[in-house]
Image (cartoon, rainbow, N blue to C red):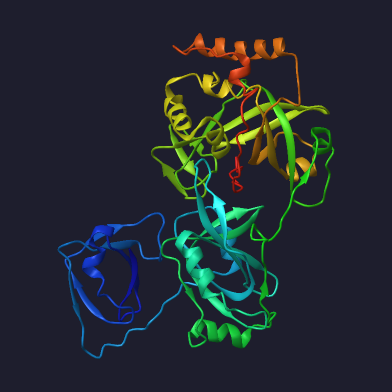
Amino acid sequence: MDIILLDEHDDHIHATIPIYLASDFEYLTVGKVYNISNFKVERKKLHKVVSHDYMIHLTSDTSIQENMSSVQIRNHKFEIVQFEELTKRQDSFIQSSDVLGRLVRIGELVDQEVKGKQKTVKKLVLRIQMNRNKQVNATFWGEKAIETSSEFSNCKSSDSMVIIITSNNVKTYRGEPTLSSTSATKIYTSPDIEEIASFMKGEQLSKEVQLIRGENENFNMKAETMTIEEVKRQRSKVTELYVVCKVKIMSINSSGSWHYNTCYSHYVKLEKSGTQYYCERCKEFVTTPYRRFKVHVRVEDNTGSTTFVLFDSIVKNIIGKDNGERILNEASSTNEKIVPIELCEIVGRSFTFKLKLTNYNLASGNENFTVSSICHEEYGDNFRHDEGNLSNDISTHKDEVDNNKEVNMKRKSIDNEFGINKRPRKYCYVDDDEDEV
């Protein structure tokens, strides 16, 4: 359980209570003043709820007594972040963000399939206008989504509402910042709150809430289906374009590395300085780099061939998270240009991918198209290629691995290995933008 403590000096700090002790502190009431002693203090570098460098852990030894004196302490303190600052916090999980704006859209409460797991989670998207020109989506998950949906269930299109949403992670969707709820996220709507009153007095935005039903996924942002030849011909002045493309993976590029080093918080490739690694986002050296996948695959359809880039979450969804983590952990002791056998085994499989085309592709005409998400895996092999050639390609990759690493694996037939005559495996994944290298 997470709580925010505010003192008479207007300083606030994040405190946490272990789940197994939650019942011991259920008497705590928002707005009351307490004297707290015998707690643990920890320095907090990442995932901070407030800007304080430390956080408090309440324990079984913690003593809490209500303070009955007339000490004056505010009920709320917010660290409101403007839109321009949000763009600087994208995919940086150093500190969560509080935002203020007028509610302009309410999405539908839906079930979202969890990547790589046979379960769903509740999801709700709100859209708020932060200033005259900038809007942002705020996505709520699980119980937070259910609570938020209930809170706004009676909201009418004629209502005018300014809200504060606290403790959000800032992620990236199609190049723009988007908010994602955390366990500490709360919504404040009272017009008596100073920040809300000030915003309502000074802003000149639309006063109407537009109810959106059945278009929750980023409010109906769709991608056009294209062939490889059509994708390669795309030229546009826009900085990003999303398309869907159905392809077969024909080979893996083994001329370069299939992984790269990052810090634990960002997807940006670390710069190597001597024997050390440096993160430009964190502005500090990284003692233990975190390896992520970046696999270049050659793909084909009936119109041509090109190169797709599969990043960490995409690869792990295909080969399995446990397999992926094991391969990356072993990467330091092997030749990084030798492709692991588990990656070789994706050769011959067909997928419908959603691609993220950037200025690199649209303006300059460069290939190497980034896979943003997997729509589903194809079976029945609509792109039939010569099986002898396919078998040779696979054997070449596998022999290369076997010659450099002891692998005792029973080879399956091509049909079984690549899914022919199997039932379709369906994927439904939220876009993961980790193409920052």
Q: Quadrant of the N terminus?
A: bottom left
Query: Which residue is more in the foreground, 79 or 243?
Result: 243
Q: Is residue 364 left or right of residue 413?
A: right
Residue 60 seen in the figure: yes
Q: Residue 306, relative to residue 204: is it above or below?
A: above
Query: Which residue is more in the foreground, 313 or 116?
Result: 116
Q: Residue 349, relative to residue 50: is it above or below?
A: above
Query: Which residue is pictured at 52% across the width and 35% down the height?
Result: 316
Query: Which residue is more in the foreground, 359 or 241?
Result: 241
Query: Which residue is pictured at 44% across the width and 12% down the height?
Result: 408
Query: Which residue is more in the foreground, 381 or 367?
Result: 381
Q: Residue 117, relative to residue 329: is it above or below?
A: below
Residue 97 seen in the figure: no
As drawn, which residue projects farthest toward the bottom? 70
Query: Residue 271, image x and y in percent?
Result: 52, 38
Query: Residue 411, image x and y in percent?
Result: 53, 12
Q: Is residue 43 left or right of residue 425?
A: left
Place residue 235 in its image quadrant.
top right
Q: Quadrant of the C terminus?
A: top right
Q: Residue 86, relative to residue 165: is it above or below?
A: above
**How many numbered discs, if any?**
0
Query: Residue 156, image x and y in percent?
Result: 64, 80
Query: Residue 260, image x and y in percent?
Result: 53, 33
